[in-house]
Image (cartoon, rainbow, N blue to C red):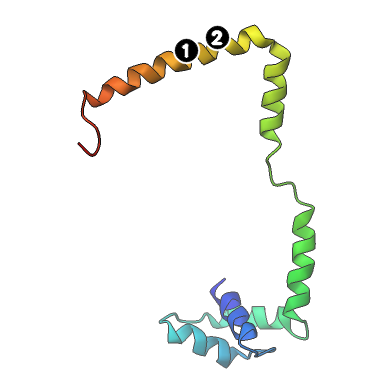
């Protein structure tokens, strides 16, 4: 990952095809040693490719990956199916718990 980050930094700086020496220079400037094997693998994979096109292609692939967020809708639907009377009981219990929790500070506030 550090090799790719250095490659991307060099790309942002205007170097469209960074060499291994360029990447090592960036990494060594912040005290990180480069792994020659991983660096050569990265450069061979990216050889002749435009990094901006690869990022755009990867972003379009990630757009189709489900990333959650649907779990809350199912829970809300289940509560609605249970009826309003069942939903009122837990709300009353929560109010009672909140009152009890306020006594935990024994009359002292955080900034008193």
Tell me the quarter of the image containing the N terminus.
Answer: bottom right
Q: Which mark is residue 83?
A: none
Residue 5 x, y percent position in the rendering: 57, 75
Q: How many marks?
A: 2
Q: Which residue in the rendered view is the most extreme toward the front?
A: 112
Which element type, helix, strand or loop, lies under badge 2?
helix
Res 95 quadrant in image: top left
**Front residue of 8 and 82:** 82
Q: Which residue in the rendered view is the most extreme toward the top?
A: 85
> Which residue carries the number 1 mark?
93
**Disc 2 packing (10 Å; few <14; some 14–19; many ≥20):** few
**Front residue of 74 and 1:** 74
Residue 21 x, y percent position in the rendering: 56, 92
Which element type, helix, strand or loop, lies under badge 1?
helix
| Residue 67 located left or right of residue 6 | right
Label 2 close to label 1 by CB (< 8 Å): yes
Q: Residue at x 40, y 17 (%)?
A: 97
Q: Which residue is drawn at 69% across and 88% down?
A: 16
Residue 85 x, y percent position in the rendering: 63, 7
Tell me the quarter of the image containing the C terminus.
Answer: top left
Residue 69 x, y percent position in the rendering: 68, 40
User: Is 20 placed above or below 58 here?
Assistant: below
Q: Which mark is residue 89?
A: 2
How far apart are labels 2 and 1 at the CA level?
7 Å
User: Is 62 placed above or below 96 here?
Assistant: below
Res 18 quadrant in image: bottom right
Q: Residue at x 58, y 81 (%)?
A: 9
| Residue 23 located left or right of residue 71 | left
**Front residue of 46 and 69:** 69
**Front residue of 7 and 40:** 7
């Amino acid at each position: 990952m550090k090799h790719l980050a250095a490659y991307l930094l060099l790309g942002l700086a205007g170097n469209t095809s960074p060499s291994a020496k360029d990447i090592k220079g960036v990494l060594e400037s912040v005290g990180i040693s480069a792994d020659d094997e991983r660096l050569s693998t990265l450069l061979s994979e990216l050889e002749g490719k435009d990094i901006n096109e690869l990022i755009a292609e990867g972003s379009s692939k990630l757009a189709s990956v489900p990333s959650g967020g649907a779990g809350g809708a199912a829970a809300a639907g289940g509560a609605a199916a249970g009826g309003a009377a069942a939903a009122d009981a837990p709300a009353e219990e929560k109010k009672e718990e909140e009152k009890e929790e306020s006594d935990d500070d024994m009359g002292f506030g955080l900034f008193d």
